[in-house]
Every structure is written in C-alpha cells, then in structure tokens.
Image: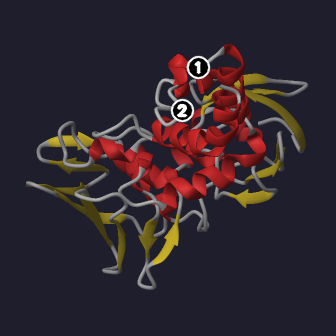
Amino acid sequence: MAGDTSGVVKCSANEDSHLHFETRSAEFSVCLYLEVSVTHPIQSRFACGLIFEVTVGTLILKISGFALLLFAPFSFVQSYGQRAVPAEVITITSTWSSWGYSSSDLAIRREGDHYIANGRVVPVRLVGEFLDAINEPPIPQPVPLNLGITERWLLDHAEEAGNHATVVRYQAGSARQKELFRNAFSDQSTIEQRLKRVYDTPHTDDYPKMIVRIEFEDKSTRLVSTDSQHPFMIPWRTGESGSKTYNAHISLALMNLLPEGFVNRGRLTAENQFETGLLYELALQTAWDVRDYWRSME
C-alpha cells in the first residue's frame, strides 16, 4: 500500500454514471451507484472513508488514508449498500382503480447473501439503492435537478413540448409565437413555479396507490407509500409520521426492483400510461402562461 494519499481527487462523470478519477500517481474508473444532488451544498460520509463535498456545479472528493481504493477500485462498490441492519423482506403492493381495478404484489426476501423475488434473483445493489433512497433527507417540494430537469433538458425538449401545447395550437402558430413558447418553456427562472403547479393539480378518474413495507433483521419495520397521480408518483410518505418527500430517487430505485407488467411500474418515471408524463404537463403549464401574449401576437 502506498503512503499518505490525502488530497483532492479530480473526477468527471459520463452519462453511464461512471466516475473517472485522476490523481498525480494513479488513474482509474469505478461504477458509481450514488447520485449526488448539486442543488445545495452538502457533505456525506460513508463507511469506506470517502467524503463528498458538493457545491453548485462542482464535485470535489477529499480522500484521507484511502490508498486501498486507488489500487482496488472495486472496494467502493462493495462497501456501497452495506448496513448495520439489512432488510429481510420488502413487500410491495400496488393498485390502480378508475373504471376498472388492477393490482400487483411482490415480496423480495433475503436468502443468505442475496435476494429472491418470485424465483428470480434481485441484485443486492438494487436493494441497497432503494434503501439508500428512502433514507435521503426529505425534499419538501419538487426540485428540477432531482427530476432530471436541467438547462440542457429544457432546451432540447422545447420544440417537442410545443406538440403538447394544445392550449395555444403551437403547430399553427407563427415563427414569433413559437419562439415565445420555446423561450418560456426553457426559462429556468420559472421552472420551479411550473413544477409546483403540475404537482398541485389533480385529475379525476385515476387512483393509483403503492405501499412498500420493509422488515429489517432486527424486526423493525419501515413503511413507504404514495397515491400520487403525477410523474414519478411523488410525493412519497415515509416513516410513521408520514412526512412527504418529492424524491424521484425513491421512485426510480423502486422501479428497478419491480418486474415488467407490475401495476403502476411505468408511473415511477417521468412518463405515465395516459399522457406523455412530465414533458406533457410542463408544456401545458407553459402554454397557459403564454396564452394571452400568444393571442396578442395573432
């Protein structure tokens, strides 16, 4: 093992969620099973000794006595998901009702060093990601970055959003009117306000529900549930107090545990089974915002 490796490690991430680390003496890549929000400065410490310091737009890793990772990249992946009290059983019940009714149930059980659900092996990593997600600090309102909405995403989807802007008949609009809509859709200064309206607006004849019960080795339990109609099915209610969190990480991690065809599984993403999900709803809110100005340009 090398001597003191304390210092700052330069890193970059690619779209496959891999971090590339560079130091003066070593260079390596590891698969990252952790999503770090850079919306607010945070600091998190893990059992393996790694400290993440995150500021807006900057990710800095400070390492102290971490030479083992430099020469054994897999050690970080292995230590991810290790907990003092492992989950024994995760029971998921999902229902949907409207003019009809459908339901699904799944029990994921620990057997030795792995998990089994209906005869299939569920990777320990996926269970760990879900448990970590429900333990993240509560998010009291929808946060764009947590939902995958960045400045680039807004710009890339502005034209497509116009196809859903039926309130202003985007396709029949003039070049100036279309530019008005695209600029409004990609405006980062209003995205949080539009997201709030999306998640504050219910619709009828659509009643989904998911309940997740986790039983731990020490016999303690944890309940996570949602009846949200909106993309990602957020907010979730967690713990005995039923506190709300608009954390899409919970939704995505849970989706990865569920088999294809499981009721409401598709609603745990930005899409949903009735419309085109978050893009549609943001386009609709944007159209209402610009409607009067749009009409004045006719």
Quadrant for the C terminus, please.
Answer: top right
Q: Position of residue 165 (x, y in %)?
A: 51, 32
**Foreground of the two, 35 or 46:** 35
Residue 292: quadrant of the picture? top right
**In the rendered image, which residue does mark 2 sit on?**
168
Residue 271: quadrant of the picture? top left
Locate residue 267 relative to residue 28 in the image: left or right: left
Q: Position of residue 102 (x, y in %)?
A: 10, 53
Total number of numbered discs in the rendering: 2
Who's the residue at 61% across and 68% down the image?
140
Asked if the residue under mark 1 is in contact with the one under mark 2, i.e. CB atoms within 8 Å, the reply is: yes
The CA distance from mark 2 to mark 1 is 8 Å
Please, which colouring scheme is shown?
secondary structure
Q: Secondary structure at mark 2?
A: loop
**In the rendered image, which residue does mark 1 sit on?**
173
Query: Would residue 195 be seen by someone viewing this image from the given angle?
Result: yes
Quadrant for the N terminus, please.
Answer: top right
| Residue type at tag 1 | Gly
Locate residue 142 relative to residue 44 in the image: left or right: left
Q: Which mark is residue 138?
A: none
Q: Is residue 142 above or below residue 265?
A: below
Locate residue 242 relative to residue 142 in the image: left or right: left
